[in-house]
Image: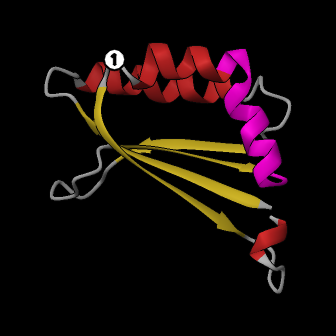
Amino acid sequence: MVHHIALYQLKPEVTPEKLEEMIRATRSQLLKIQEVLNIRSGKKIDPHSQWDFFVSLDVESMDKLAMCKDDPVYVKFVEEVIKPHTREGLILDYEMEPGKNIKYS
């Protein structure tokens, strides 16, 4: 199983209300994608953290993650929620199965 984490810096004009809306939109939209097994999103607690917003999701494999990213719901989410409100991101993918060779992820 693959855990996909995306950390984002928000644009200065994003209000706390808009951030709350982004969190809700993330959860409601991305759960519609068949390949997504679990989704989480939230805002930073530490005021010194450079990453204001995160999205994480679980999928069965990197192939399923690629299918997820090609899904029209995901593409629309990125275009309407991520791109207009973020200025920088960091994407991380992790294999969660102990002992599994990552080349088979």
Relative to 27, 7 lies left or right: left
Q: Residues within 10 Å of mark 1 (few under 14, many from 20)?
A: few
Residue furthest bottom in the image? 99
Q: Residue at x 39, y 26 (%)?
A: 20
Place of residue 73 in the rendered image (x, y in percent of width and height, measured from the top left): 68, 17
Q: Which residue is nearer to you in this view: 32 or 79?
A: 79
Q: Residue at x 76, y 52 (%)?
A: 62
Q: Which SS class for mark 1?
A: loop
Above or below — where is 100 with respect to 84? below
Q: Is residue 37 visible?
A: no
Position of the N terminus by quadrant: bottom right
Give the residues in magenta.
59-73
Relative to 6, 94 lies left or right: right
Place of residue 95 in the rendered image (x, y in percent of width and height, measured from the top left): 71, 69
Inspect the magenta stretch and tell me whether residue 2 lies in it.
Answer: no
Q: Which residue is nearer to you in this view: 73 or 46?
A: 73
Q: Is residue 70 visible?
A: yes
Q: Which residue is nearer to you in this view: 91 or 43?
A: 91
Q: Which residue is nearer to you in this view: 52 or 62?
A: 62
Q: Residue at x 80, y 64 (%)?
A: 105
Place of residue 40 in the rendered image (x, y in percent of width and height, measured from the top left): 59, 44
Place of residue 68 in the rendered image (x, y in percent of width and height, measured from the top left): 74, 33
Above or below — where is 102 with respect to 17? below
Relative to 83, 59 lies left or right: right
Q: Which residue is mark 1?
A: 84
Magenta-highlighted stretch: main secondary structure?
helix
Classify residue 74 by image quadrant. Answer: top right
Classify residue 89 by image quadrant. Answer: top left
Which amino acid type is shown beneath numbered disc 1?
Pro
Above or below — where is 46 with respect to 65? below
* Render colour scheme: secondary structure
Inspect the magenta stretch and tell me whether residue 63 lies in it.
Answer: yes
